[in-house]
């Protein structure tokens, strides 16, 4: 028995690599050194932009993947944070622009977006499935037309322009490399927070509510509160993504939060996969690359068709998106590789083979 335990006990470095994964380590190294090997266009228009949209899709993944609630209002929540930055910060439009310092403005904008998200969750909580999608889509559409027609608060169709990222520590955070690292830091923080929350008591309870809300309610859990809190948490990430988005564009208008943008968030999340927080970022890279270069291939009027075709192909091949394709590829790996991933089974095989050689 002691021989079996000794053979099955993994080494310290093996345990670390098994938990972290060589792929994850390689990905982190690549993301850190990416600005050193890419041009300014790829750093901002591909790298930073993908991270921003990945955060917006991640906020949807929290609701849909862990809570079973598909919300089409995530871009509206991001828009709340973006308009807050434009109204209470500085802009060149001459409308509002109260000049709040960024260290007060950004937390206020993110918190306001999260509160609005919680309110939307409270409204849509009594519905399920397609009805939740329709209610949140109605909220997104209503907010779009409200911002377009309201000039006293949102400056109507023109919106706000000349919104600049902050400058502190002697760094212009809208410069290509600093802005990329700012987006990367926010994305990593959001990713780690979602991953940690999914394994916490609340995250496991939320997933149980997704699987069988009636049983969880019978066990004494407050299902409504868990769902509303999930909307609040998703609003924090969507709000942070909205702040980065308005700094990226340097402006915000109703076109930033229209229905097509709401659909893009859903498409990104589905393409990447909603079973793991990395999925939305994978989907964001795919969609941003298509949006950036499809104009040169199929023209400006047809690139949405190309995105739709890619979406259909991935969904038909794997309902779980790119992550599902990756899981299928791992299942096709040789059985020997599967055995190596199980230390106990590897120990048993090692002892068996040793005894055969002795015989």
Image: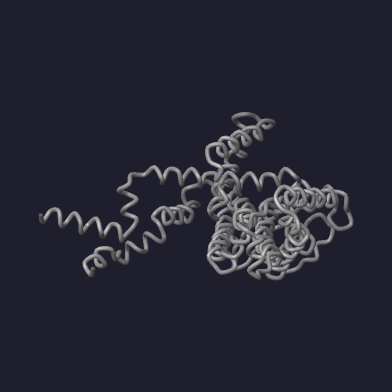
Q: Quadrant of the C terminus?
A: bottom left
Q: Quadrant of residue 17?
A: bottom left
Residue 314, percent from left and from top: 55, 38
100 sits left or right of 41 in the view: right
Residue 353, percent from left and from top: 18, 54
Q: Quadrant of residue 8?
A: bottom left
- Pick the residue in front: 335 or 57: 335
Residue 257, percent from left and from top: 75, 49
The colour style of the image is one colour
Q: Quadrant of residue 200?
A: bottom right
Residue 7, percent from left and from top: 24, 63
- Pick the residue in front: 280 or 64: 64
Height in image: 344 above or below 336? below
2 sits left or right of 328 in the view: left
The residue sitting at the top extreme is: 298
- Pick the residue in front: 65 or 234: 65
Q: How many numbered marks are there? A: 0
- Pick the residue in front: 279 or 86: 279
The answer to whether residue 139 is seen in the rendering is yes
307 sits left or right of 355 in the view: right
Height in image: 123 above or below 291? below
State the residue at coordinates (30%, 48%). Answer: 336
State the residue at coordinates (22%, 57%). Answer: 350
Height in image: 98 above or below 277? below
State the residue at coordinates (32%, 49%). Answer: 337
């Amino acid at each position: 028995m002691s021989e079996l335990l000794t053979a099955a006990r993994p080494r310290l470095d093996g345990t670390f690599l098994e938990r972290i994964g060589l792929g994850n380590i390689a990905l982190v190294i690549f993301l850190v050194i990416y600005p050193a090997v890419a041009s300014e266009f790829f750093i901002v228009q591909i790298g930073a932009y993908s991270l921003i949209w990945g955060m917006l899709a991640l906020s949807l993944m929290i609701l849909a993947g862990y809570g079973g609630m598909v919300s089409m209002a995530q871009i509206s929540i991001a828009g709340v944070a973006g308009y807050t930055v434009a109204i209470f910060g500085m802009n060149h439009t001459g409308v509002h622009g109260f000049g709040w310092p960024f260290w007060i403005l950004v937390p206020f904008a993110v918190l306001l977006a999260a509160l609005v998200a919680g309110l939307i969750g409270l409204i849509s909580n009594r519905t399920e499935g397609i009805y939740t999608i329709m209610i949140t889509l109605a909220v997104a559409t209503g907010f779009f037309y409200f911002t377009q027609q309201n000039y006293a608060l949102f400056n109507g169709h023109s919106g706000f322009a000349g919104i600049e990222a902050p400058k502190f520590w002697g760094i212009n955070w809208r410069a290509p490399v600093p802005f990329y690292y700012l987006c990367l830091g926010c994305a990593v923080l959001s990713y780690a927070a979602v991953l940690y929350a999914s394994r916490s008591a609340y995250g496991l309870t939320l997933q149980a509510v997704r699987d069988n809300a009636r049983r969880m309610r019978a066990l004494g859990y407050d299902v409504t509160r868990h769902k509303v809190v999930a909307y609040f948490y998703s609003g924090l990430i969507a709000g942070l993504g909205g702040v980065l988005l308005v700094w990226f564009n340097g402006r915000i208008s109703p076109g930033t939060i229209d229905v097509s943008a709401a659909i893009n968030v859903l498409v990104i999340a589905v393409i990447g996969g909603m079973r793991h927080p990395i999925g939305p970022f994978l989907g964001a890279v795919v969609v941003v690359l298509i949006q950036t270069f499809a104009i040169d291939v199929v023209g400006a009027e047809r690139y949405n068709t190309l995105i739709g075709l890619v979406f259909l192909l991935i969904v038909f091949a794997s309902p779980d998106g790119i992550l599902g394709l990756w899981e299928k590829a791992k299942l096709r790996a040789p059985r020997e590789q599967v055995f190596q991933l199980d230390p106990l089974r590897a120990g048993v095989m090692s002892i068996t083979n040793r005894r055969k050689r002795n015989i």
